[in-house]
Image (cartoon, rainbow, N blue to C red):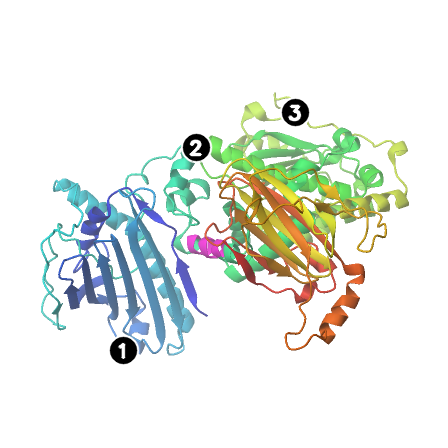
Amino acid sequence: MVQKYQSPVRVYKQPFELVMAAYERRFPTCHLIPMFVASDVTNEETSEDGSSHRIERRCTLDVDAPRLLKRIAGVDYVYFIQKNSLDRRERTLHIESHNETFSNRVIIHETCCYSVHPENEEWTCFEQSASLDIKSFFGFESTVEKIAMKQYASSIKKGKEIIEFYLKELEDEGIGYIPRWTPSSSPQAVTRPTSLSTSPPAPPKPATIPSVSVCQPSESKDSTAQDSVVVQADSLAEILAATPEDKLDADYIKRYLGDLTPLQESCLIRLRKWLQETHKGKIPKDEHILRFLRARDFNMDKAREILCQSLTWRKQHQVDYLLETWSSPQVLQDYYTGGWHHHDKDGRPLYILRLGHMDTKGLVRALGEESLLRHVLSINEEGLRRCEENTKVFGQPISCWTCLVDLEGLNMRHLWRPGVKALLRIIEVVEANYPETLGRLLILRAPRVFPVLWTLVSPFIDENTRKKFLIYAGNDYQGPGGLVDYIDKEVIPDFLGGECMCEVPEGGLVPKSMYRTPEELENEDIRLWTETIYQSASVFKGAPHEVLIEIIDASSVITWDFDICKGDVVFHIYHSKRAPQLPRKDPLGAHGIASPGVNNVQLIDKSWTLGQDYSMVESPLTCKEGESVQGSHITRWPGFYILQWRFHNMPACAATNLPRVDDVLATLQVSSHKCKVMFYTEVLGSEDFRGSMTSLESSHSGFSQLSAATISSNQSQSSSMISR
């Protein structure tokens, strides 16, 4: 299996020339990297005007491997070939390196790049990527892979110390500025091939001629000044400004996501990039992606699988809009004994659930499973929002919450079979879609019946989650090792012996008058499942359906998601400086026959001329029946944008006037020349858009909730047919 690494963007708040001079001092050897024994220049050439400098080195590494493995391999040192291309005019350094030793058994390839920050020419960016592919190694393939990955991660981590050391050394020598290359500079030496020599390597060149190379993956660079400074909550804008578009910055990761190893950073970046390339539009936040990686111990394939399943689930149930659309029924507000209450000592949001006081049977009989599930999902969504807020407030990454469950009053009535069934389903859904959100679970006043409930529930709870459970019987929670170890005394609820008033409902029995019949509960569940933020529209031959979007701020992002439920359509996007007339709804079908429930709106007046009154801003996209399409468009001008779905006329055969068989069949399938579309649109500010800003386009996909309901959804395939 090929192991890959991708670094975040490391931003130095020093000019490119100074960073180059600092790195140059690493050669021919570097005492900060004991395994880097030596480097010999094998070839070097400089352009006549001195603007470009290419150098090739043969680097010697003393790999920290078991002596037995070295004896079996028959080598003491490992050699790498490194090719560096410095462009002083463009202020970039590109580095490529590969292994010379065991190149037929092990393939190691690394690329690095230093460049000027796109927003600040006095800053320097660094990125690197690498791959390791072990074909064979005397039966020790697994061991070699572990050794290689361990040393690679260690070298990357040590890179920060190296850049700091040499920049400090330059500063101590009074070198704080190195002039940029200009065309008037005196010509450098002409091409000078250098043969491989066993003589001691030449000393480094003066700092004023920054020809720099690296020999191994220790170029991990954070800003030398920034890394030692505690980043305050209001510095997010500065961090994001220091990051090239669509890339993660190392300072941002540390401040908002936590301390990650280099390989964990790589997994996050690679999975995020995969999502950007695969799912156009609004992708999950970095914190969300990271939770799924942690849930699968940063196994990329496993994390990607469960994340994609969860993203599909979120879309099917419109979970992203739950906090705005879900309103808890009054019975939940009165009898659901749970609520948010301050935070714990680590700054995590604290949720309190008085499960022993909750009438689970009454809630299930009054509401049904679906309402209870939606309520629990809204609690989890609120928890994610509170984590983001606390991250800003406390100036440290907070990605999970603490839950306190009071079991006083728990008895056999809580083991009512339908109630337990509903609880198990809720646990299953939460475990699958909110991994690594529970930081700690404090279970207080556990009664004798608790082991029975625990036996039923625990098999459905992930092992890593179970390790976060702390269970107290009786009043054990009041002494040392109890609540005071995790929650400040001033926020311990009054009903647990504290002084803080807790607004969590006390619960009680749900009146039987509020119980609903099984038929009513079933109808309510169906209503909740079929409620949708999607709109349906009919598209007729000669009567397209159009949606008007007014844009006030340029550089907004229009996103769309639609499914072709029937027929084939062509999707257009137009822009107009003036507002169209009031929508005209077509009350008739294609042949003048009334169609109840038809939604067909036309905005573009027939007197309008394309190119004068309105203009096309995207190439048209032909969409087939059963396809699901997601995409986005960055607006360039304010005004009015019109999304249009037009009936797709089948082209006649070019060689004859006779219709093709496929055309006839297609016409028969689309009765009355009518198509049906279900769609959803949203306008985002460019700063809130988390998708790929460099390749905004529509794509066909099976990702939508509706494609699964169409007969052709399994035939949906990825494609990119509209691009900016």
Residue 122 location, x and y as percent?
A: 26, 42
Residue 521 location, x and y as percent?
A: 85, 43
Q: Nearer the viewer, residue 408 or 422?
A: 422
| Span of residues in magenta | 265-273
Q: Which numbered disc, 1 or 2, marks the residue closer to the eye?
A: 2
Q: Quadrant of residue 659?
A: bottom right
Query: Can I make out residue 484 in this image?
Result: yes
Q: Provide the secondary structure element on which disc 2 rests.
A: helix
Q: Residues within 10 Å of mark 2 (few under 14, many from 20)?
A: some
Residue 695 location, x and y as percent?
A: 48, 54
Q: Which residue is mark 2?
A: 233
Q: Residue furthest front?
A: 607
Using the numbered discs, state the Cα–Cα distance from disc 1 to disc 2 in whole angstroms: 54 Å
Residue 74's disc number: 1
Using the numbered discs, state the Cα–Cα distance from disc 3 to disc 1 in whole angstroms: 70 Å
Query: Can I make out residue 35 in this image?
Result: no
Labels 1 and 2: the sequence-earlier one: 1
Using the numbered discs, state the Cα–Cα distance from disc 3 to disc 2 in whole angstroms: 29 Å
Residue 502's disc number: 3
Question: For residue 271: magenta?
Answer: yes
Q: Provide the secondary structure element on which disc 1 rests.
A: loop
